[in-house]
Structures are given as structure tokens and as C-alpha cells.
Amino acid sequence: MRRQLLTGGFTGRQQYGTNYGIPGNDGVHPHWAGHTLMAYAYLKAVGLDGDIGTFAVDLKKNKMKVSKGHQVISSKPGEFEIASSRYPFCPCAPEGQSAVSYPVCGQDGVESDDSIRSGMTLVPFNQDLNRLTLVVKNGNASQNQITWGGESKTFPAEQLTKGINLAAEFPANPFSAAFAKVDAAVAAKQSFETKEMKNLFRQTGNFHPTMAQITPHTDDVVGDAEKEHAALVAAVQAAFVPVSHVIKIAAQ
């Protein structure tokens, strides 16, 4: 990981200027780009596959086949509705729908070291760890417009035949709002875990016995804390729900 941070910082300064800082302003606490490089290194090390799913479309038959974790709900010419229980990683969130510190879509430029999308330009994050692939075959046009959520992009037919990574091509997408809700629930759980370890358990003496005396109320404190923690874990699970989204394919 150290090598990843060093090479990423060097590349970032070359691409985005000398003020671009992977290790953060104090040289210790990174911004979002630095965290992205750290996450990439850890996830690669544990062997994460990164295959979120594949949507294979036959335009001639107007049929879509999907991989595990996804289901075609309905279809009409050039349009497919899908329900997905596997999320791509979303590097930004709609305004007001994420944890306070999370990058907001449309406000995080890739030139900033406080942007996840910026960190993604320094490592093959999407290619290796975040692949939601759309394959489109048997069309008559030389290029097709793909509309996913509120965004549209046009691709050559040859590129679509090989497959495009929706997660990379559409950073703001139909999963963004749902991803933000899960992210906010995770952030709330992690915030409480910090309080639980640094304050509640330490006060009872269970965490650092040399810093405080164990009291008759130790079991009560731990029990109450774990109940609150269990509720926050349940909130994360409840936030993670299938997302319905529509892919439209139009000849250009």
C-alpha cells in the first residue's frame, strides 16, 4: 500500500498540480483521493473479484440476459427495467443524501485530492473492483445512445459489442441515492463505534483497565452500548434494498 500511495501521489501531482496531496494537508490524514488508493490496495490484497454484474442485450430479439443479483422486470423495444440487489460503488452522492463529508455529484472535480473520482484516475479501481458491464449486440446502427437514469452517452456499436462499464461511464447513476443511504447508515454505525471504544468502554475500565476502575455498572454500560450498536447494524441492513433502474438503447 505504501508504494501505491507514493506512486499515486507522484502521478497526481503530475496530472493535477503540485498542491495535490495524497497524504492530506498534514501529511498523515488523507482526503478522499488518498482513501481511494488505500481502499484499492486493501481490496486487491484480499482478492475482491469486482464483478458486480453483466447485462447482455440482443437488440434483434430485444432481450436482455442478466447475471446473478439482477432481474429483468420488464422490457419494450430498446428499453429494459431491472431490479438489482448488487450495487456498484458510487464515488459521489446526490446533494443532501450522503454523510456530510461524502463527495457530492457535480461538485467534486477530478483535479481535487478531496474527490473519490480523482483517486480513481490514479489506479484502475473501476476496471479491477467495480465492473457493471453492459453488452449490446445485433444492432443495425453504427452507434447507440445509452440512457441510464438521468444521464445519456453515445457509444460506437463496436465498443458496445465488447461491453462498457456502466459504473465507470456513469459516476452519477440510478444507484447513487440508494448507495448514499447505505453510506449514511454505515457512517452512523462507525461514529457510534468510535464513541463506544473511546468513551463508553474506556470509562468502565474494560478498554484500558489502567485508566479507570471497573465499576458495578460495567455490565450495564456494555450491554446498553451493544444494544445501540445492534440497532445501527440493523439500520445498515435495512438501508440495503434492491434498486429498480432502466436502461434505454437508441440508435444514433
Image: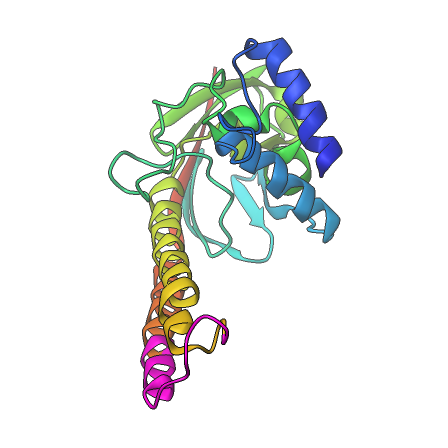
Q: Is residue 227 magenta?
A: no
Left or right of residue 238: residue 125: right
Using the rendered view, name the quadrant where residue 152 is placed. Answer: top left
- Most extreme residue toward the left is 96
The answer to whether one can see residue 1 in this image is: yes
Between 204 and 51, the one nearer to me in the picture: 204
Residue 224 drawn above or below residue 84: below
Between 216 and 224, the one nearer to me in the picture: 216
Where's the N terminus, which quadrant? top right
Residue 181 drawn above or below residue 94: below
Between 159 and 113, the one nearer to me in the picture: 113
Q: Residue at x 45, y 33 (%)?
A: 78
Q: Position of residue 60 (x, y in %)?
A: 57, 34
Left or right of residue 43: residue 18: left
Image color mode: rainbow
Q: Position of residue 54 (x, y in %)?
A: 60, 44
Using the rendered view, name the quadrant where residue 127 is placed. Answer: top right
Q: Position of residue 37 (x, y in %)?
A: 62, 34
Q: Residue at x 35, y 65 (%)?
A: 238
